[in-house]
Image (spheres, helix red, strand yellow):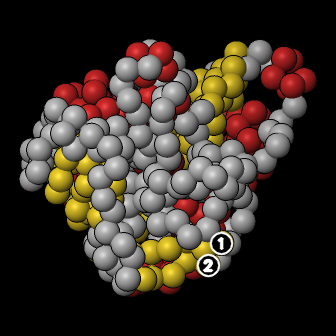
Amino acid sequence: MHGLIFSGPADVRFADDLPDPTLRGSGEAIVAVDAAGLCGSDLHPYEGREAARGDVVPGHEAVGRVLQVGTGVRGFVPGDRVLVPFTTCCGRCAACARGLSARCAHGQLFGWGDPDDPTAEPLHGGQAERLRVPLADGTLVALPPGRSLLDGVLLADNLPTGWTAVERLGEVAGQTVVVLGLGAVGLCAVWAARRLGAAAVIAVDPVPARRGRAERLGAVAVSPDGAATLAAEVAPDGVTGVVEAAGTAAAQRAAASLVRPGGTISLIAVQTAAHLGFSAVTLYDRNLTVVSGRASVRSLLERLLPGLDGVTLPTDVVVSHPELPLSDGPGAYATFAARGDGLVKAVFRP
């Protein structure tokens, strides 16, 4: 089969001689990938900010059709249209039972190889023609009828991640929310905040085109330099909560200064630094709450999808490059890393 291979920082290549994945256990499935997203978190190992093993198929957002299932799989059959969240989960362990599927005791991240344990086999990701899915019954999600492949890619990660970021702020109905960083997750957080009843959403990003996308979702958008002034105008009593979706120390400092005393900061971007951009003194002196962590997409989708039946997702706003062949993958990674060509969200079509 053909697909992409991550070999190290700034080194992603296209290959047409990859071995087809095979079932290795009774609870597994093989999925033919029809669409696979390029996520901002794919850039962390690509840019060398996060250590990762080489010789791994990257990608953790996939939509496709079940080709084959093991004898122990009960919930899916060949031909089913499915989306594949970014981490596997069993659905039975203590973490899964309390809705923390992202921290399943048996879970693995797709497209990732542990650099600290060279004996642990990596789980290849979705940026290839086929994908092996362990723990298929607990991991796979049926793609709802009427949903497009692009909708499915958003539902596999970015949309529920952005939704999680806003939910962690607590009650936002009638309140003002700030979103820092308008990549795919930040834009989905803007959309989620509006869906959850926020009176106003202030969207902050240095890139004008990204601010324009947020405005299409109902936000008031501003550059970082103007965020404090706009927040004071829109929310004279202070901002209830801030979603930090940029993953930078500067954005974290901005979050701590924009949120009102007693407010909440939701850190949803992947964190790769050893320390936050604000101090414990700031948290204490301003009575701030900070929430963070990987979104439990599989658990969230069980309660989120029914409420989104018939709802138009922000797919057209978020996905900037909807149909890239995998052979364009190396160039897409380089362009994304350079913040070029207006790329916010790319989707590969194997």
Tell whether 36 sits left or right of 249.
left
Image quarter in which the N terminus is found: bottom left
Residue at 77 percent across and 34 percent down: it is 257
Q: Could you say which is closer to the camera, residue 318 or residue 274?
A: 274
Residue at 38 percent across and 54 percent down: it is 61
Q: Amino acid at mark 1?
A: Gly
Residue at 72 percent across and 50 percent down: it is 116
Horizontal and vertical percent for residue 332? 48, 78
Residue at 54 percent across and 24 percent down: it is 169
Q: Residues within 10 Å of mark 2 (few under 14, many from 20)?
A: some
Q: Residues within 10 Å of mark 1 (few under 14, many from 20)?
A: some
Q: Could you say which is closer to the camera, residue 106 or residue 62?
A: 106
Q: Is residue 282 above or below residue 97?
A: below
Q: Is residue 125 above or below residue 312?
A: below
Horizontal and vertical percent for residue 33? 26, 63
Horizontal and vertical percent for residue 265? 65, 29
Please count the marks in the image.
Answer: 2
Residue 8, numbered circle: 1
Q: Is residue 347 above or below residue 232?
A: below
Q: Which residue is mark 2?
A: 11
Q: Amino acid at mark 2?
A: Asp
